[in-house]
Image (cartoon, grey):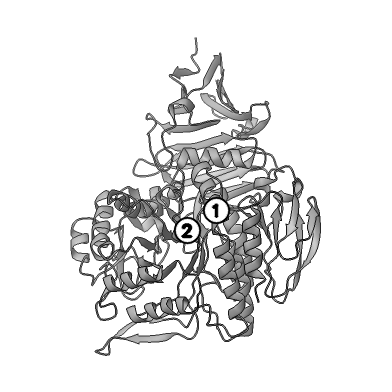
Amino acid sequence: MTVHFHVEGTRLVWRGDGETVVVEPWGRDSVRVRSRLMHDIVDHDWALLPPAPAHAEADVVVAGDTATLTSGRLRVVATSRTGIQLQTGYDRNFCHLAFFDVDGRLLFQERDAGGSLALVAREHRPIPGGDVRLTASFESASDERLFGMGQYQQDVLDLKGCTLELAHRNSQSSVPFVLSDRGYGFLWHNPAIGRATFAANGTRWSAESTDQLDYWVTAGATPRDISRAYADATGHTPMMPERGLGFWQCKLRYSSQEELLAVAREHKRRGLPLDVIVADFFHWPRMGDFRFEEEFWPDPAAMVRELDELGVELMVSVWPQVSLESENYAHMKKENLLVRAERGLDVHMSFEGPSAFLDATNPRARAFVWERCRENYGGHGIRTFWLDEAEPEYGLYDYDNFRYHAGSVLQVGNVYPQHYARAFAEGQWGDGETEVVNLLRTAWAGSQRYGALVWSGDIASTFAALRAQVTAGIHMGVAGIPWFTTDIGGFHHGDPDAEDFRELLVRWFQFGTFCPVMRLHGDRLPTTPVHAADGSRRSPSGGPNEVWSFGDAVTPVLERYLFAREALRPYTREVMRDAHLDGQPVLRGLFHEFPDDERCWTVKDQYLFGPDLLVAPVMEAGARSRSVVLPAGAEWTDLWTGAVFAGGGEIDVEAPLERIPVFVRDGAQPEVVEAVRAALRAD
């Protein structure tokens, strides 16, 4: 008698043709699926946390060649077959998985064999070294809508029809969690370099090099339910510290202690709110020294004390690049704390000189870099870090040419930014710091639990780039990264004296006011050379990038939005609490709160800041009005005029340069709304 399935505790196990498949409950309404060739499955903890005992139970029923595992709202039906393959005449064993909701509606299923096509849903193609090149293929509804996956620099909301590289680049964060409007979420729990394709005729996930198939599925009645389950599975973001609720000032780059302090003093002289100011890259002697260069930053402790008296926190940039001339390079190279090139010269980047990357997947490397940063930054009272280059940004993205402690980059490359954030969060927590927020350029699944605030990288200073940041912010929220921000004004250049850039800057500043974190940054014109006292060159600085740097007509507008952000603080704090406790995005697509309104699944140029503020940025040059979709199921009050509109319609609103259309949901905090309105309408 053929035994098709085994039940091992709450696990459903199938074996055949050298493959082992395991399906098990993994959280409320959720399961984890793994399969491996010729071995038992491996308990990788790349992003998933152990489920709570109460949510690790399931009902498993086996009836001959069919088995059903039910975990809350999710039901998995496994069908086993043994038969003759016509093409070869040999026996073939296979197991097909289909996923249903509690009402019996098919969510998606593995690709069928297709009769004589002899298709394979789980293709493990062996490659030299023992790993496999993996492809997992699924059948899904052609009309479903998909969201998440992190940030890709494209103005696309519905990902159905897209193919996405599963790899990080500067301004690209691959976070492989996708939410379907059919009521499920899917995490590709594999940090390998690969690709995801969401086609009309099916979904395909691939990994260039891996040891097993591993994914997680949850079912939910609403996007809120799915977000909550995903946060439970991969970790909740901490509570945002108070300094994350206000305004952050940055430029490329303050080249000295005195220049940075002068800006903070001017903010306070003008009476302008300021929570954080940033010492950007090349404040160090050499990359990888992890300390201030004494000539330009003679007394960091005194600088931090003065900033503290002004009510301002200092954030410092830390790069994972280690120059071959760094005082730490020889030690780190000898102790295997650096990434290793598989071929050619062991140089990974050559920005301001050849360098190699810290291996953040190595626990000893994480401990080493935190020890240096504790001594040289933490010892001065600094507790906020800008963890730049977190992809990491190889000179050429030849992913097959580098190896980490955790494996080759082809196998594990996407986990790097999560471990980079982990190095600092665990170091800070170990030292007793309870309010961790660190800025990174990239994230992967689980990064949020290490206090990772992710910004969208070195993007262009254009309206097209601004439009892409709205969809990027929505997708990042869906992908479980609630702390998201952008360089207000874009990063690449932008001339403060040019009228077209000033218009862009105002519109971006308005958008930034209603983002999870409001941060002004960019490499502005003109570039300013920097030299040491002996005449030797240092990395240059960009042009002025303070709120008073863009002309007398612009400055009052930006100042009003600074005060509006400050007035939002009580509301933003509660939205951040919702992210922390319940796993909800801060910047949300309209569908997140209004899934029953079909239009809300298609609106890509508006979003919700928390549950109650509908934001409609102006993202076209010269535009002084725009149309706004008002979701059904609520009444909406124009923040500027006080006019009330019923939901379910679309209206045209005026949007002069000083105004961003914002609508308030009925029941929102009235005192906050009045404070924001007063700040924005101040003369």
Q: Residue at x 63, y 63 (%)?
A: 676
Dot 2 lies on which element?
strand
Q: Is residue 343 left or right of residue 590?
A: left
Return the residue nearer the eye: 207 or 8: 8
Q: Which mark is residue 122?
A: none
Please provide percent x and percent y for residue 646: 80, 52
Compared with 154, 560 (above or below) is below
Return the residue nearer the eye: 432 or 296: 432
Q: Is residue 192 visible?
A: no
Q: Quadrant of the C terminus?
A: bottom right
In the picture of the structure, the residue carrying the numbered disc 2 is 454
Which numbered disc, 1 or 2, marks the residue that appears first in the sequence?
2
Three-letter code, disc 2: Val
Q: Residues within 10 Å of mark 1 (few under 14, many from 20)?
A: many
- Residue that protrudes farthest toward the front in the picture: 671
Q: Which mark is residue 476?
A: 1
Please provide percent x and percent y for residue 599: 75, 50
Q: Is residue 509 left or right of residue 6?
A: right
Label 1 to label 2: alpha-carbon separation: 9 Å
Compared with 80, 434 (above or below) is below
Return the residue nearer the eye: 120 or 5: 5
Compared with 401, 237 (above or below) is above
Q: Residues within 10 Å of mark 2 (few under 14, many from 20)?
A: many
Three-letter code, disc 1: Met
Compared with 211, 553 (above or below) is below
Q: Is residue 54 left or right of residue 301?
A: right
Q: Is residue 87 visible?
A: yes
Residues at discs 1 and 2 in contact (Cβ within 8 Å): yes
Please provide percent x and percent y for residue 57: 48, 23
Q: Residue at x 66, y 46 (%)?
A: 593
